[in-house]
Image: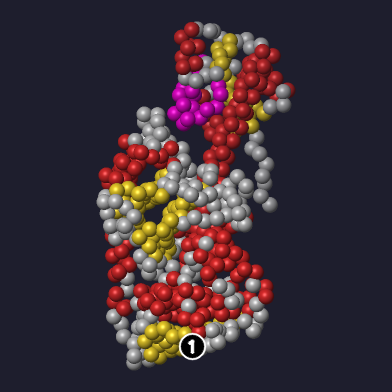
Amino acid sequence: MVSHTQPEHFILVVDDDAIASQRISDFIHSKGYNVIVCSDLEEGLFEITQNTVDLILINYWLKDGTALALLDKLNEEKQETPVIVMSDTKENQTVLACFRMGVLDFVVKPINVEIFWYKVECLLSRVQLQHKVEQQRIELEKMLYEKAREEHMARHLFEHLVNIDNADFDFVQTYCQASANFSGDIILNGMAPNGNFFLILADSTGHGLSAAMPIMRVASTFRAMVSKGFSLITLIYELNAKVHRENPEDRFVACIILEADFNRNKLHIWNGGMPPLYIQSNECDNLSHNAIEQFKSTNMALGILPPHTFIADVFTVDLPLNGHACLFSDGLIEQYTHEERPFGIDKLKELFINLSGGLTHYLNESMHEYCSTENIADDITICTLDFEKLSSWHQSRDVSRAQSIMDGEFHWDVSIAGPMLLSADYLSSLNQFLSIFGFATHFCQRVFTVVAELFSNAIDHGVLKLDSRLKNDPEGFELYHSIRESFADRLTLNDWVKVSIIWCSSQNELHISVSDSGKGFAGDENIIADIPQLSGRGLSLVKTLSKTYELVPPGNITKVIME
């Protein structure tokens, strides 16, 4: 068994006067303390190395030197054991020399033991307090070190979880400066199965870890829903519901979300509680030559309103072929500069106009000229999007794979019935399936869009028999989706939609068939003729992307050929 007993503590008396040292030793013993008595410096120095000495009481004149020699040795070895010097005389130079060497007290013989012990107790209390403070300092440093290690690990894990699958594109440039170990700002991007590009800048309330936790939820939801092909509107509503449900009432997340819709050549913009988005372009129809268009927030930040009262207002403009967009949180514009005034939104706008895509590089190089990066009050995040590079990236994706020749045939069939119709996610697997066979990304995106539209039409107009003319105004749109959701509990296994996809390499064609359990439109040729209007712009897009389109009577089977 290992002994954990504490080492004995001693008071060391160094004096060649045997009678005086014995008298002091006996008195110290009577007070319950251990004593070591030595008659010269050499013996005293040896005992110091062998025992735990709390106090040294030494006569100034000894046969092998003076107390100054012992003091010099203690200072050399950086030992802080308190020392009291005794002497028969009180010469000023002697006393001054002792105090200069670090002596805590100087007493003149004969010693009044009662006064002497009072001084000793004060010194011992002081020593014990110093030892306690030193031990607490060591423990505190250890705790701070462990805390720093844990924060480093947590920050590494947080950044990994937030930025997983977050691709590094040259058309997205960022400047980020956190005010604490954890940032409440994030910039994420993602590509939907139909090829659309999504970009989000989010700013959570608060600072540090409390602000970072909601960001993790936003990041995971954004990533999952974009990869599964959900629309921007659906994504926004789900983000709001998740933040509202899983965070305290005083916590919300402001954000800007952009969707570059390459199929329709549109840029969709949602701003919820953030500073304005700036777009600088001379190609967009909505913008004048070389002008700056701003899109202010027209929505509440995520998590403030409950899902049943939350409404998402999305701006849509033509997708610019050149120029830049600038997204930013309020950290920089509210940051105080060296002149003790806010950086301001006008200054940021001026820099964006003059620097465009070089804004973030400029801030990385020159931010210190405006304010101290050591004294950041709030997380600072700025992002620029280069539309010309974005367009080039989209046009050049997987060109080599688009040239590949795929011999043979395959059949891809899926049948979904019951309530699963309104919640099943099969399209992401379709996109992956086509990619495995070497189909070009832009072709996979077209197929995804076509199948998604036909599948949605089969559910809404075939199985549920909904009239999309309800969506012509905001109130009807809300009613349309309310009715759609109410049907979820009524669907049975007799309600189904089937999708069949066949690749015919000899004709270099993909044959798509979507059928449903609905009765179709038999007996009403006018309705069949109005099918494009029944499904709105979605069906028109299907016809544009397809080689042939056929609605098979009685109207519950649609066949499409793509090449």
The quarter in which the C terminus is drawn is: bottom left
At 32% from the left edge and 73% from the top edge, which residue is drawn? 398
Give the quadrant of residue 38.
top right
Q: Which residue is mark 1?
A: 552
Camera-side residue of 515 and 442: 515
Local packing at callout 1 (Cα closer than 10 Å; few below 14, some 14-19, many 20+) is few
x, y percentage for residue 230?
Answer: 50, 67
Tell me where the magenta segment starts and ends, as one range: 61-83
Task: Identify which residue is drawn at 66% across, 39% down.
Answer: 6
Q: Is residue 67 magenta?
A: yes
**Which amino acid, by three-letter code, is at mark 1?**
Val
Q: Position of residue 484 (x, y in %)?
A: 60, 70
Location of residue 312 in the rendering, given as x and y in whole percent from the top left corner: 52, 56
Tell me if residue 548 comes above or below residue 98 in the rendering.
below
Note whether 428 is above or below 379 in the view shown: below
Occupied quadrant, residue 260? bottom left
Whether residue 424 appears in this view of the structure is: no
Is residue 404 shown to the viewer in this render? yes
Under tag 1, what secondary structure? strand
Query: What residue do we see at 58% from left, 47% from top?
Result: 251
Residue at the (38%, 36%) spot, across then down = 343
